[in-house]
Amino acid sequence: MANVIEGLYYSESHEYVKVDGEFGYVGITDFAQEQLGNVVYVDMPEEGDEVEAGSEFGAVESVKAASDLISPVSGEVVEINTALEDEPELVNKDAFANWIIKVKLSDASELDNLMSAADYRAFSSK
């Protein structure tokens, strides 16, 4: 079973958000990286770009598939994980330590629309 971490927020499209004050770190879940296989490229937005909950903000490509990244929250991208530009496989090593974008949250109430760890565990085991 894929690793699911308590205290994070999860989307049905298999992204997570780790909230730290007014910021959210967005990445793909351990379940998603397992399904994708060896990640070879991560397409990320630019710093300063706006992302909107439910909208595409990039993509993850693996040797067997490509998957759009859907933002679970809205806000301004204040940082991208530049380590993934040279080493996209870091997502496979630890999906939760290797977030993709850091967002300044514009509407924290959007978190209420996401799943808890227990809810995500049940959802991803269907």
Image (cartoon, rainbow, N blue to C red):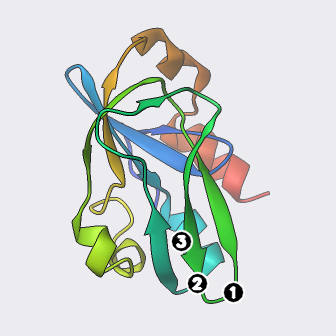
The type of residue carrying mark 3 is Gln
Q: Name the residue: 31% across, 70% down.
A: 84
- Tell me if I can see residue 2 in this picture: no
**In the image, which is nearer the foreground, mark 2 or mark 1?**
1
**Mark 3 falls on what kind of element?**
helix
The residue carrying pointer 3 sits among few (fewer than 14), some (14 to 19) or many (20 or more) residues within 10 Å by Cα, namely many
Q: CA distance from mark 2 to mark 1?
A: 7 Å
Residue 124, image x, y percentages: 68, 55
Is 57 placed above or below 19 here? below
Residue 77, image x, y percentages: 33, 35
Q: Which residue is mark 1?
A: 64
Q: Earlier in the sequence, mark 2 or mark 1?
A: 2
The type of residue carrying mark 1 is Lys
Is 32 placed above or below 69 here? below
The type of residue carrying mark 2 is Gly
Is 92 placed above or below 2 here? below
Q: Name the residue: 52% across, 17% down.
A: 110
Residue 88, image x, y percentages: 38, 77
The residue carrying pointer 2 sits among few (fewer than 14), some (14 to 19) or many (20 or more) residues within 10 Å by Cα, namely some
Tell me the quarter of the image containing the N terminus: bottom right
Q: Which residue is mark 2?
A: 37
> Which mark, by number, is residue 33?
3
Q: Earlier in the sequence, mark 3 or mark 1?
A: 3
- Tell me if I can see residue 115 in this picture: yes
**Mark 1 falls on what kind of element?**
loop
Tell me whether the residue at label 2 lies in contact with that at label 1, contact meaning CB atoms closer than 8 angstroms. Answer: yes
**In the image, which is nearer the foreground, mark 3 or mark 1?**
1
Q: Is residue 84 left or right of residue 41?
A: left
